[in-house]
Image (cartoon, coloured by chain):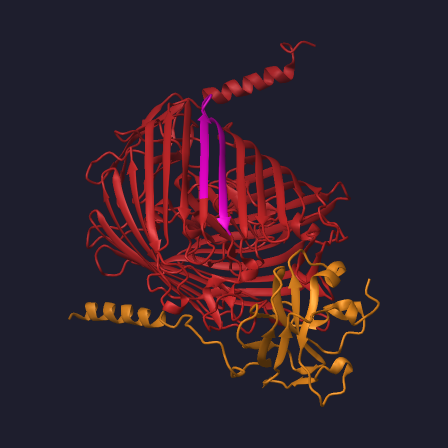
Chain colours: A orange, B red
Amino acid sequence: MSTRARAATAIALATALACNQGLEPALTPTSCPRDFVGVCGTVSFVGQVPESTAKVFVVAFDTFPRSQNDLFKFKPQLNPAILPLGGPPFFYTLPLPPGRYEWVLAVWQKQGALSPTNADTLLRETGFYRDAGDTTPHGSGIVIVNAGTSTDSIDFVVDFNSMHRVCDYFPPCP
Amino acid sequence: MSLKSSPVLVLLVALSSAALQAQSAVVYGTVTSAQGSPLPNANVELVGTALGSVTDRAGNYRMSGAPTGRVVVSARFIGYLPAFDTMTVVADDSVRVDFVLTPSVTQVDDVVVTLPPTIVTAAKRSQLLDQAVTSVAVVSDTDLARRAVNTVDEAVDKAPGVQFLNGQVNIRGSTGYVQGLGSRVLLLVDGVPANQGDRGGINWDLVPLEDVQRVEVVKGTGSSLYGSSALGGVVNVITRDLAAGWHARVRASGGAYANPPYAVWRFRDYTGGHEGLDVTGSYGTDRVRGGLTAGGWHSDGYREQDRQNHWQGSAKGVWLPRPATRVTASGSWASDQSETPLIWCSSGGCDDRGQAYQPFMIDTTGRGRFTRSDKGYVTALVERTASERLAWQARASWLRTSFTDLHQGADDFGVANRLGAELRGTTRPAAGRVVTVGAEVARSDVRTNIFTGDTSTTSGVIRTHTQGDFAAYGESEQLFGRARITAGARVDYSAVDGGGLSAVVSPRLGGVLATSRGAWRASVGRGFRAPSLAERFVSTTVAPFRVIPNPSLRPETAWSVELGNATRVSAALHSDVAVFWTEAYDLIEPGVNGSSIQFRNLTRARLAGLDVALTAQPPVPRLTMALAYTFLYARALARDSVPGAPLAFRPKHLLTLSADYRWRAVSVGGDFRYASRFERVELYPDDARLAGKVLDLRAAVEQGPLSVRCRLANALNYIYSQVPRTLAPVRTLSVTLTWTY
């Protein structure tokens, strides 16, 4: 093989090697991934999923909401963890900045255009993390996320037969 | 006072008569290949005038009404190097100029190809590329044909310093990724602004690729001549000239998308394909020419919910009523009906098969989304070279875009119009001086249910918003020995919904110095982008947030400095190097506040870097190689309590390597593009981020009127994503058959 042909082969080989490390399949994790910052856990499902379901997702609040105005102070704001609509237990990962969280919950969203004024109609709390040792209102468990680490085993049940409107927490309901 | 006795009219008649008498020369000749074969459909132009012609089947051309004095004639043909000739034309004379064109890749071992002088219109007039004060990349018709692409954005994508992110163009990192709302690059079609009137984005399929002669990419701020949106650069699409006689072209294409490389990612039980057909026909005489293009294509897409149908048509007519006067009317229309694949499915968002993500599938919340998009423009242009010293042009244009997004719960729509007019004059008042002045007016409106400006959450609101713009500009170039100094400015006035006028002034100072070490260029200028009507008035819900309007948005502005050099390093190597520095103010970005999102003037940013473009003919016969590299430092500066951070969606390194080899009728080539991993992304910062590493291969056979071109884009099927949870195109095979009459 001539020097020129060897050089061309080397360039082609280097190019091929450079391009072979794209995205690859990755199994849904069963524990918090390494270098992940946030909370993880397993959600179990109970009940029949309503036909009008748009989606179900997990979010967290620093402090338990005290008014309707606090309802949009959840984290993460733009990419909550989406849950499947029923089925076998599901392991979720919820990226969160380090801090103390008083309420980690699943939210059921009904089909329709959502706005702050119709949140009562379209959103339901459908399950949240509980810790009997905690003394926060409504029995929700406090979760701590430390810098650079993740908090595992934040497990809870999503019960489609027992969903609560937002106004249940700030009565009276209309 | 009767008209006949009007002294002004008498003077005008006398002047025009004198001008006509001085412009009756004819330039004619033939264009042939080195083997003596006539080259039909070659473009022949009188540089710096409106005069042009296209050769007939025997390779003959004829241009009447050439101005007297010293003129430059150019001849171009796909696959050949342009040729130029300079001569002195005398009134009533007939001058024969024959051109013999050489292939763009030499077929002679020992001959080194000299890079041709390239004409660009970055300064709103024809000038040589090495006389432009800012960096300009040109994608020629040869490049377009060689790459066998289907749309303009595919053709421009590999230009030095240019990167596309899901259809959104970045020139030196100007725009990032803002999902189509507000481009910091201005699209021109034959000099006519063509950004959407409502969203400010760009429809790259507005012009059929069949109609495109070349694309000029002006890097850096161009607002001193072009106004808003030219903050990061200008992309000017130049359409083909029309030839005398009958001409036709049929272009059929087809191909297939690679299936997912892993079985667990399979989402359909067939191989997706794409196919298209375009037909172009034209007829022309010395005085009147017209052409029509019609076509369409279908694509199955390379991922779930990605099917698309596209229909397009365009027309162009040219009337040459008198010497040195040219009237052009043109228009284009395109319609797309496309499924809309939003973000890919992550664990739990679909039938994920136990995977953390499924890049070929979409999240169930985005199921059923569909978009219908129609866009078109018509424009009329009058160009006249009144004398050796004065040329002017006037144009009027109408751009219309409409879209309907169908999705669960509610449909969004917008119908936007942009009516524009421009009057421009270029004069040479003294030796070595060129002055360009002009004025532009435009009126944009949008009728919509999403950009309403409605602050309540009432559904079903439909509103109309309008924006009026007026601008005046001027630029003067003076030759001082080997230096050309350019100074100019543009002032833009704008009023939204009949409100008060706001003004932005965009000056620019530049120069080019020809030395033994090449041409040095330097420029400093100010650019701006007025907020789009969509950014001002968007009112919608991105669950669970309410996106609220901000009518008081101010324009983004930037100061940009560039220093560059273009030189022939050796007989076989040409280089173009530029350093650039941009200080940007008040960049418009969405900000979250409680339960609402609002576009605000948030970011103060700095973008600086280096552009290198090398073209070489290595000591291998019939081979050309090119390298383009851009280093980009792009950072949002600290403000209030927010610390500084890299600007999102900007690669620090952007590298393109190209090689082409031609042997007689056969050519093969390829491009390799590397875009480094983004330092920062938005929405899903925890997702895996990868560098872009894409290899495109191509091959072609040309024989007489037939050509067959194959393109294998992303040949190594590198699976990656550069915008949030959106799979970049996979390996795609395209075969294009073109017949030209």
Residue at horizontal 39%, vertical 20%? B92
- Give the quadrant of the C terminus of chain B: top left
Give coordinates of residue B512: x percent, y percent: 49, 52
Q: Quadrant of residue B730?
A: bottom left
B705 vs A87: above or below: above
Is residue B630 visible in the rendered image? The answer is yes
Give coordinates of residue B414: x percent, y percent: 62, 44
| Residue furthest to the bottom | A133
Left or right of B122? Residue B540 is right
- Give the quadrant of the N terminus of chain B: top right
Q: Nearer the viewer, residue B83 or A75?
A: A75
Q: Quadrant of residue A150?
A: bottom right
Q: Does the stretch in magenta take in B581? A: no
Q: Nearer the viewer, residue B669 or B84?
A: B669
Residue at horizontal 83%, vertical 69%? A171
B57 vs B475: above or below: above
| Residue furthest to the right | A172
Q: Which of B396 and B739 is in front in this view?
A: B739
Is residue B532 visible in the rendered image? The answer is no
Q: Does the stretch in magenta take in B313? A: yes
Q: Nearer the viewer, residue B151 or B622?
A: B151
Residue at horizontal 65%, vertical 64%? A109
Q: Which stretch appears magenta?
A: B310-339
A44 vs B569: above or below: below
Residue at horizontal 45%, vertical 43%? B310
- Dominant SS of magenta comes to strand
Give coordinates of residue B12: x percent, y percent: 58, 19
Left or right of B205? Residue A45 is right
Count of numbered badges drawn on the protein: 0
Left or right of B342? Residue B636 is right
| Residue furthest to the left | A1
